[in-house]
Amino acid sequence: MVQEYETIVVGAGPAGLSAGMFIARQKTSCLVISKDLGGQLNLIPKLENYPGTIMSSGPLLARTLENQYLTFHGEMTFDTVERIDEDESGFKVKTFRTEYKAKSIVLAPGKVPNNLGLENEGNFANKGVHYCTKCDAPFYQGRTTATVGVGGYLVESGILLSRMASKVYLIYRGGQLGGDRDLISSIEKKENVELVPNTSIKSISGTNSLQQITLLDNTGNEKTVNVDGLFIEMGSKINLDFVKHLVKINSKGEIEVTDGGKTSHPAIFAAGDSTNIPYKQIVAACGDGAAAGLSAFNYLEKLKGRPGIRSDWKKTIGDTTFHY
């Protein structure tokens, strides 16, 4: 028998778990489906810029959000959504293992950073190898770093690192940097930045953490460099193949949303890094996830002929419930 829910949330990162929390808190049946817990939170060993938390980590925040969601009797399963289709009662959600039905959907699949594809790259993740310069550059004050990537991602990474690290190797395959000309001009003047064109990274090595990278230039020459950290800025990918026939997606491959996480489909809402929100930060994902969750709840309320709510806070006095 196919299990039915009022709302299904795709993704268990900060946006998805926040959406699920605000839906389940309204005593609405909700299922979160995700391949893992936390998404890109798992790439953050130290979390300094989440309001109200002096020092935490991405995995710890993910576990905290999960516990809050489950406290409100939401359900979770680890699986992969393969396709979402409309049917007479709402939506049919097909996963790798089974199938579900729902009246509304919240999309929060996030994005996945592209890696270099090195043999032991995963061994050094968060141990010297990072995929978010904005997140982790502050931990390399006065240290030696390298950054490799493409276009504007690489240039911006180099600018950020140059303000903190004592030395930055800027590695790129082509003969020229791509991106904003003013930023390129700025980074070319940085005394602590060494440009390494026509070069790729052949291998990385270390004991408990990253210690060395081996460079390979276009002529076949190799060079080994000692570094404390390597930042990989190769862009990222968002997988929306399972739902692209139902919602509007922009030229960057992101879900187009308006206020409250509304998409082009009246029963589908979205939040987090897979949307066109301008700031890809955890706190923004949580806030937008909460808004998308409340929008999904209000959609369900309107299906029942009810007015919906403007916020999540409520108080019951006698037989009457007041929403504020």
Image (spheres, rainbow, N blue to C red):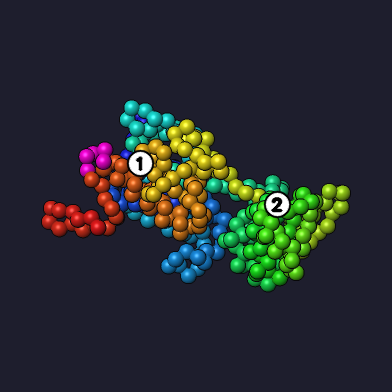
Q: Where residue 194 appears, x then y in whole percent?
A: 77, 63
Residue topped by disc 1: 7
Q: Where residue 199 appears, x then y in whole percent?
A: 79, 52
Q: Where residue 67 appears, x then y in whole percent?
A: 39, 55
Q: Residue at x 54, y 52 (%)?
A: 40
Q: Main secondary structure of the magenta part?
A: loop
Q: Where residue 149 appears, x then y in whole percent?
A: 69, 52
Q: Secondary structure at mark 2?
A: loop
Q: Residue at x 73, y 53 (%)?
A: 177
Residue topped by disc 2: 178
> Relative to 254, does residue 180 appear above or below in the rendering?
below
Q: Residue at x 84, y 54 (%)?
A: 222
Q: How many marks?
A: 2
- Stretch in magenta: 302-306
> Relative to 100, does residue 322 appear above or below in the rendering?
below
Q: Is residue 303 magenta?
A: yes
Query: Mark 1 or mark 2, which has the lower sequence index?
Result: 1
The answer, for residue 120, to whether it is visible in the render is no
Q: Nearer the viewer, residue 192 or 202?
A: 192
Identify the residue at the far front of this view: 182
Q: Nearer the viewer, residue 283 or 175?
A: 175
User: Nearer the viewer's eye, disc 1 or disc 2?
Assistant: 2
Give how far apart the Cα atoms at labels 1 and 2 are: 43 Å
